[in-house]
Image (spheres, grey):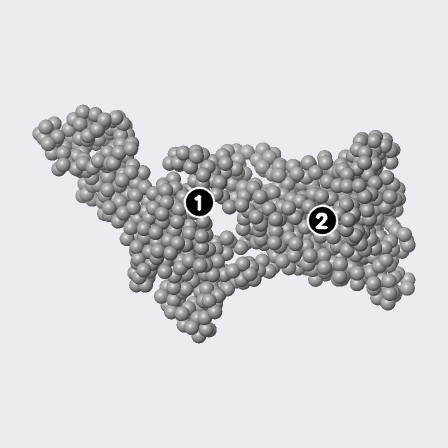
């Protein structure tokens, strides 16, 4: 019996490796190798040797720096906005049950089912020039609003809308670790809502908030579709900038340089995020 | 759901129950959230849906001047729309089938088998998450340039396939792990071979989640824009690319709206089915919540 | 001083009635156990007293002050939760001091009071530890200290020891009783364990299906259950379905004197059955003998197959399959809609003499 089990495990070793071989090969060929290639290929050139000229160009070029700066603050603002908007909903959903709460949850998760192309389209119809908001304002004899379409506010609004569900789910799963009894206990001793949030709930979900922010930063820093469709043409965010450099300017070297720079800016967040998933899953064991 | 719970035999008469129930406090906070979310989340979608049936809607009218199905006929008779739809469906189907074929066995191995380097390899899959996605696509696209895969069907399939790897592995891994070992052991106990156990116990138990993973992959791949844009254009124009063209080139507003309703409703139903199976928790856990 | 008066309390969740028609008076310094199976409404009742739920009907008064609509923090109550609900990011000291800090007491006083209460629950010197570094029993003591430190008039305990093992549970419940008596505090203790309730309470409130079944001292509840539910729930009890008629109740082949007519339930405690010589109509067959050391329980069957448990002296030895005679010393008859009637072999002597003499 034991011998049979053992041979089964030996077979498991080989067949295990065989079963994961294809995805792993694909991962190495199309992700890890390109990343390595991008990092090395932008500083080492066969024949001519080392050169950091493309990086020097990026960090001296005024337009590139303006794009980077735009990306940084849009990412920061959008991440914070997503958490700020999702937090009250998450708190409400954690501590309330009932049919109204179920509806709130369904609505808040709804954007998950709306592809970003459709988000962009719907955004233009609502907040774009002569969109429904303008229509309503005119009908009420109020002045039209300055449309956020093609300004940095455009992608920010679109990205907050689009990212609300996942932010909410991450926060909810963090709040799941705060037991209702521990909140009741604090309430019993006289803690008000504010004290409850800052002294009991916040310390427990600190790590969840950090992970949520990291997840958002990673997704936002190189966001492409919404900034491209809703954002300004100049300066532009890193996503559209990379795409234009690669396709329109046919300049893969500078596009790759920009990609490596985004990797560098996101490295810390990537580390935080992957560590959190790896810890949460405790590996596949 | 509690409505269906049996009322205990000690309960007072129905009138007394009704009297108590009516005093249940109204959830004002919830209603406030509901109202806010309804405006912010539903209004854009409703407006777009109305556009799909508006034949004439000139600013600043609140409602369309003329409603009808005219634009449906016009949009759905465009050859570029149908070409893109078939192309998208074939790319998406190819990606989903290949992805399932290579990822599900790998997921089973990660979940159930012990082999050297298992944790490291699994971490390698997770580490993809540490990179901003569009940067990765740029890096891969540079490789594709040298392989002449830019603007080809298989180039798009490959880049999409990579995008599905993570989800098609981690969702099934948790599905296989979720199958109670004792169920498998009980089957071994009554004399089933390991293969038999896999086909009769493990797979059926994990099937709903695997099915959900396939649905999610299918819908996400169909609507993927970042990679399709960079790798596919200009030769390979998927459905979302056609929609982006409609948005950017400011052709008739209604074309986009019609496609929106035409494509989104079926995909929404698919995703709803997927989520029903998986539950919100599984989504969040996979994301590191 | 700290009295709790519940008047006409009812609580519904949606269309489900969790509690109904509840009147109860808890006296100063009393420890009252709310005892019942899960779903009986005992935790709901406790949460109503603590202010975590608002009753659908009725009023709650503490020391004559109506607190029905006051939130938990404005009631002189403190709750110890089932899952101890300690704040894992704070030390033991931090957990206990939290309520005092909210009251903005001077630092020195907080330290003094925390130390005193930690000493009281036997955790002196543990202040700097994190809850995760404590055992289950110690965590529950911290939770108790956290509630006691704010000097509530009424201590509420919601199955506080449910997650602990039997041995520890018995020790802690004695300690709680001890502390409660030393402080002279009023306490309401929710439990589903009858041993726990019988061991520590001044009075027990038995709940079932959201209704109060009986309120009384432990011995009283055991000896004189008012409903068939209480009879079956508290202590071991043989419950037999029977029929009344001709001045006796017939159940499972057993005939005992009883008044009334129609269907009824016959309740007999295992220790109220004595063994005797086999006699017609009063014979059982031994299925199994269980030796508990201090006493012996005989699992037997009546002539129609109904099980009957008999508790007897540890010196008694019987064999499986053996037929033995029984004599029922005390029994209670429950009839729907009527007060239970209790009989003992003394009170029914005339009948006995008439029939068996």
Query: Share a chain, discs 1 and 2?
Result: no
Can residue A126 be seen from the camera position used here? no
Q: Which residue is located at x 84 percent, y 53 percent? A: A243
Left or right position of C148 against C259: right
- Label 2 sits on a secondary structure element that is helix
Left or right position of A10 against C168: right
Q: Quick one: label 2, few (<14), some, or many (20+) residues within 10 Å? A: many
- The percent position of residue B131, horizontal first and vertical second, equals 74, 55
Q: Nearer the viewer, residue C21 or C111?
A: C21
Q: Nearer the viewer, residue B217 or A117?
A: A117
Q: Chain of mark 1?
A: C
Q: Which residue is located at x 40 percent, y 70 percent? A: C113
In the picture of the structure, the residue carrying the numbered disc 1 is: C56
Q: Using the numbered discs, state the Cα–Cα distance from disc 1 to disc 2 in whole angstroms.
A: 41 Å
Q: Which residue is located at x 50 percent, y 38 percent? A: B2
Badge count: 2
Q: Chain of mark 2?
A: A
Q: Which residue is located at x 48 percent, y 59 percent? A: A186
Q: Nearer the viewer, residue C233 or C100?
A: C100
In the picture of the structure, the residue carrying the numbered disc 2 is: A162
């Amino acid at each position: 019996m034991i011998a049979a089990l053992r041979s089964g495990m030996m077979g498991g070793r080989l067949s295990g490796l065989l079963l994961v071989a294809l995805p792993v090969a694909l991962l190495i060929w199309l992700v890890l190798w390109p990343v390595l290639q991008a990092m090395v290929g932008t500083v080492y050139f066969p024949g001519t040797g080392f050169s950091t000229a493309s990086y020097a160009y990026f960090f001296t070029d005024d337009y590139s720096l303006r794009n980077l700066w735009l990306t940084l603050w849009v990412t920061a603002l959008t991440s914070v906005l997503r958490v700020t908007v999702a937090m009250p909903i998450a708190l409400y959903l954690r501590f309330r049950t009932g049919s109204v709460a179920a509806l709130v949850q369904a609505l808040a998760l709804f954007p998950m089912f709306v592809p970003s192309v459709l988000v962009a389209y719907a955004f233009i119809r609502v907040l774009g020039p002569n969109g429904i908001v303008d229509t309503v304002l005119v009908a009420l004899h109020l002045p039209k609003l300055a449309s956020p379409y093609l300004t940095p506010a455009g992608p920010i609004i679109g990205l907050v809308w689009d990212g609300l569900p996942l932010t909410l789910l991450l926060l909810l799963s963090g709040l799941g670790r705060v037991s209702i009894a521990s909140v009741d206990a604090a309430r019993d001793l006289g803690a008000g809502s504010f004290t409850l949030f800052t002294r009991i709930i916040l310390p427990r979900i600190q790590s969840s908030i950090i992970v949520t922010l990291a997840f958002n930063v990673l997704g936002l820093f190189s966001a492409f579709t919404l900034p491209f469709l809703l954002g300004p043409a100049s300066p532009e965010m890193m996503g559209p900038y990379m795409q234009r450099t690669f396709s329109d300017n046919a300049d893969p070297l500078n596009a790759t340089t920009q990609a490596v720079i985004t990797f560098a800016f996101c490295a810390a967040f990537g580390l935080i995020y992957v560590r959190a998933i790896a810890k949460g899953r405790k590996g596949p064991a | 759901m509690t409505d269906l719970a049996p009322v205990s035999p000690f309960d007072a008469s129905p009138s007394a129950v009704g009297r108590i129930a009516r005093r249940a406090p109204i959830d004002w906070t919830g209603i406030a959230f509901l109202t806010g979310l309804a405006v912010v989340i539903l209004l854009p979608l409703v407006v777009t849906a109305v556009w799909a049936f508006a034949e004439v809607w000139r600013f600043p009218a609140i409602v369309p001047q003329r409603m009808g199905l005219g634009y449906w006929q016009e949009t759905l008779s465009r050859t570029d729309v149908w070409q893109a739809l078939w192309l998208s469906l074939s790319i998406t189907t190819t990606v989903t089938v290949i992805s399932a074929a290579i990822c599900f066995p790998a997921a089973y191995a990660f979940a159930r088998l012990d082999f050297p380097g298992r944790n490291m390899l699994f971490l390698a899959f997770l580490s993809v998450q540490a990179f901003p996605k569009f940067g990765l696509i740029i890096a891969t696209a540079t490789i594709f340039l040298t392989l002449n895969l830019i603007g080809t069907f298989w180039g798009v399939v490959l880049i999409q396939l990579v995008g599905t790897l993570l989800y098609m592995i981690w969702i099934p891994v948790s599905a296989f792990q979720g199958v109670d070992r004792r169920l498998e052991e009980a089957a071994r106990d009554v004399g089933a071979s390991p293969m038999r156990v896999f086909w009769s116990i493990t797979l059926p138990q994990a099937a709903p989640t695997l099915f959900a993973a396939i649905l999610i992959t299918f819908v996400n791949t169909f609507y993927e824009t970042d990679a399709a844009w960079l790798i596919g254009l200009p030769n390979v124009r998927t459905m979302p690319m056609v929609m982006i063209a409609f948005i950017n080139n400011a052709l008739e507003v209604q074309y986009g709206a019609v496609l929106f309703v035409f494509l989104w409703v079926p995909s929404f139903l698919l995703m709803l089915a997927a989520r029903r199976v998986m539950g919100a928790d599984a989504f969040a856990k996979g994301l590191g919540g | 001083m700290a009295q709790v008066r519940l008047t006409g309390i009812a609580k519904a969740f949606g269309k489900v009635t969790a509690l109904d028609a509840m009147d109860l008076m808890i006296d100063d310094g009393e420890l009252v156990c709310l005892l019942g199976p899960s779903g009986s409404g005992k935790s709901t009742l406790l949460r109503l007293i603590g202010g975590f739920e608002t009753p659908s009907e009725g009023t709650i008064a503490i020391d004559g002050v109506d607190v029905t609509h006051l939130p938990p923090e404005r009631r002189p109550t403190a709750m110890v939760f089932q899952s101890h609900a300690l704040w894992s990011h704070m030390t033991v000291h931090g957990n206990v001091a939290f309520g005092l800090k909210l009251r903005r007491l001077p630092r020195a006083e907080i330290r003094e009071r925390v130390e005193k209460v930690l000493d009281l629950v036997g955790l002196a010197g543990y202040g700097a530890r994190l809850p995760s570094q404590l055992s289950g029993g110690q965590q529950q003591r911290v939770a108790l200290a956290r509630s006691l430190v704010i000097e509530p008039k009424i201590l509420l305990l919601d199955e506080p020891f449910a997650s602990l093992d039997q041995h520890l549970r018995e020790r802690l419940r004695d300690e709680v009783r001890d502390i409660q008596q030393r402080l002279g505090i009023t306490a309401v203790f929710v439990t589903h364990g009858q041993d726990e309730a019988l061991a520590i309470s001044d009075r027990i409130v038995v709940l079932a299906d959201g209704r109060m079944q009986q309120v009384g001292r432990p011995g009283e509840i055991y000896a004189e259950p008012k409903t068939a539910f209480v009879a079956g729930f508290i202590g071991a009890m043989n419950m037999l379905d029977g029929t009344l008629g001709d001045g006796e109740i017939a159940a499972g082949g057993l005939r005992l004197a009883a008044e009334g007519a129609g269907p009824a339930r016959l309740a007999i405690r295992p220790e109220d059955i004595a063994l005797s010589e086999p006699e017609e109509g009063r014979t059982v067959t031994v299925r199994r003998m269980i030796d508990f050391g201090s006493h012996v329980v005989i699992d037997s069957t009546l002539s129609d197959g109904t099980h009957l448990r008999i508790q007897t002296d540890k010196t008694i030895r019987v064999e499986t399959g053996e037929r033995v005679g029984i004599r029922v010393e005390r029994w209670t008859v429950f009839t729907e809609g009527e007060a239970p009637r209790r009989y003992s072999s003394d009170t029914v002597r005339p009948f006995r003499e008439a029939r068996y003499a």
